[in-house]
Image (cartoon, rainbow, N blue to C red):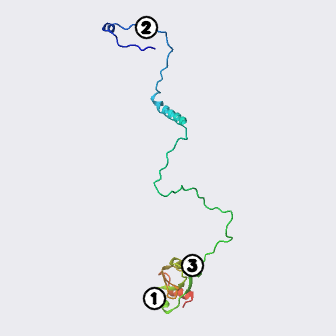
Amino acid sequence: MPAKNTKPATKAAADKPAAKTTKAPAAKTVKKTAAPKKNNSAVQKALKAQRATLKGTHTKRARKIHTSVRFSPKKSLVLPKNPKYPRRSTPRRARMDQYRILRHPLTTESAMKKIEDNNTLVFIADLKANKNQIRDSVKKMYDISALKVNSLITPRGLKKAYVRLTSDHDALDIANRIGII
């Protein structure tokens, strides 16, 4: 279709109204209108989904930038052990029981003085035993509670444990019961 010249060529032509030209009636064209405001977000979402499906999922991905010199792989799943049968027929027995921890009570003169004056019993203990194990062993064997435990290793290579008893226990009575005195 030739373009119409909208500007009048002369001043006289501008004063006259434009003549109507007769044309054959054309088919009605439907003008696309934007969706109403409330459906606009739904339309945008649909258009975005359409673009994504046309683009596809296997697009080029940006490479990860490694900032460390050492490469450490991602941690994978490590399940706990769940064996079908035990690898040992019987469980291991505890090597440090109360009878190994406390070897024997000490009955020297200085030990007797500690019993009388300081409410303290003196034992020779296992070298590998610690103070908590000594305290628990005294509680199990003699049913007494210790206030505190001091220990030392003698020049002969034995561990000596000084067990201070609480005020509700008398060291002299316990010593008689054990058979020291």
Q: Is disc 1 placed on a helix, strand or loop?
A: helix
* Mark 2 vs 3, N-terminal side: 2
Q: Is disc 3 placed on a helix, strand or loop?
A: helix
Judging depth in this view, the residue of 137 and 15 nearest the camera is 15
Judging depth in this view, the residue of 12 and 131 nearest the camera is 12
Q: Nearer the viewer, mark 2 or mark 3?
A: 2
Judging depth in this view, the residue of 7 and 28 nearest the camera is 7
Q: Residues within 10 Å of mark 2 (few under 14, many from 20)?
A: few
Residue pictured at 49% horizontal, 31% vertical? 43
Judge left or right: residue 147 versus residue 87: left
The amino acid on which the numbered mark 1 sits, given as a three-letter code, is Asp
Residue 16 coordinates in the image, percent (x, y): 34, 7
From the image, tell me which residue sits under label 1.
Answer: 117
Residue 75 coordinates in the image, percent (x, y): 55, 56
From the image, tell me which residue sits under label 2.
Answer: 21
Residue 111 coordinates in the image, percent (x, y): 49, 89
* Mark 2 vs 1, N-terminal side: 2
Residue 143 coordinates in the image, percent (x, y): 55, 80
* Mark 1 vs 3, N-terminal side: 1
From the image, tell me which residue sits under label 3.
Answer: 140
